[in-house]
Amino acid sequence: MFTVGKDIGLHAKQDRASGGSQQGRGRVVRLFLHASSLLGLLAVLTGCQSTTVLLANFNSDTVGALPAITQATGTVSFDLGAGSVTVVDAPASGLPANKWAQISHPAAPSPQTAMTGHFTSPGGPGNYGLLTSLFIPSGAGIVTVQFEPFGQPPSSYVNFMHLDFMPEGDVRVDDGPVRFGRFPRDQVFTLSVSLAITATDATVSITLLGAGASGSIDVPVDPTLAVMARNFGAVKFWMGFQSQGTFFVDNVLVTRRNQ
């Protein structure tokens, strides 16, 4: 598995050579690479060939419109409810001139507002890596990133694991007692997730990277959801009826390699 991040471009982090311990983590190197360079970097870091199953960035899309359904690799879909998903320019001054997806959710009571990135095909067991940039403004409610089986409609929220970026500035795993890390408001940070999915179980390693972001944790997937994990095929970014606000997503990359 790899642990890599991007903040206003891309950060690279050395592999967790000592089982994810703080001492075993290497220094973070600021690289400022385009999303198209990620695969080459990941191959160097992992020492093996990986395949892109999802790459969604929005630089070719039209500002003010929905993101294009067909992305560089895979597709995106939307569950808009009363909210909106819109292509916008960079959400803060001083950032590179990338376009972002802006997800806006109105005050409750309102159904969820979501954008889902779908893989080209169901992955099956393997080692997966997600990299994406997030920008969560001050005052935004709970932002959720979740991992879903292949082929379900955008209005479905069935998942085998999800992460809630909480108003308190930390991350909650699966609505339970496990909370970790810190993420900044009004700044770009990187979410890096490694998923080791086998024929019998699945483990997820989550890292927050970038200025003002910190924290890493390894958590098992609920064994009753292992079958769903073996059909991993989509990543959803959404805000639910209990929250209100806007957040931004850029450069959603998922890779897969055989175990």
Image: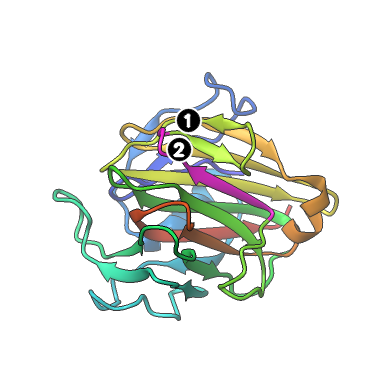
Q: Amino acid at mark 2?
A: Leu
189 left or right of 118?
Answer: left
Marking on residue 208: 2
Secondary structure under badge 1? loop
Residue 161 lies within the magenta run: yes
Quadrant location of residue 87?
A: bottom left
Colour scheme used in the picture?
A: rainbow
Q: Is residue 50 visible?
A: no
- Name the residue at the front extreme: 109
Marking on residue 106: none
Q: Is residue 244 visible?
A: yes
Report the magenta residues as a range: 160-169
Tags 1 and 2 in contact by the CB under 8 Å rule?
yes
**Residue 211, how many percent across, how many down?**
31, 34
Secondary structure under badge 2? strand
Position of 148 relative to 204 (above/below): below
The first of marks 1 and 2 along the sequence is 1
Residue 165 lies within the magenta run: yes
Q: Name the residue nearer the viewer: 256 or 217.
A: 217
Q: Residue at x 32, y 58 (%)?
A: 34
**Residue 114, how many percent across, how many down?**
47, 65
Mark 2 is surrounded, within 10 Å at the Cα level, by few (under 14), some (14 to 19) or many (20 or more) other residues, namely many
Q: Name the residue nearer the viewer: 9 or 75.
A: 75
Q: Residue at x 48, y 30 (%)?
A: 181
Marking on residue 181: 1
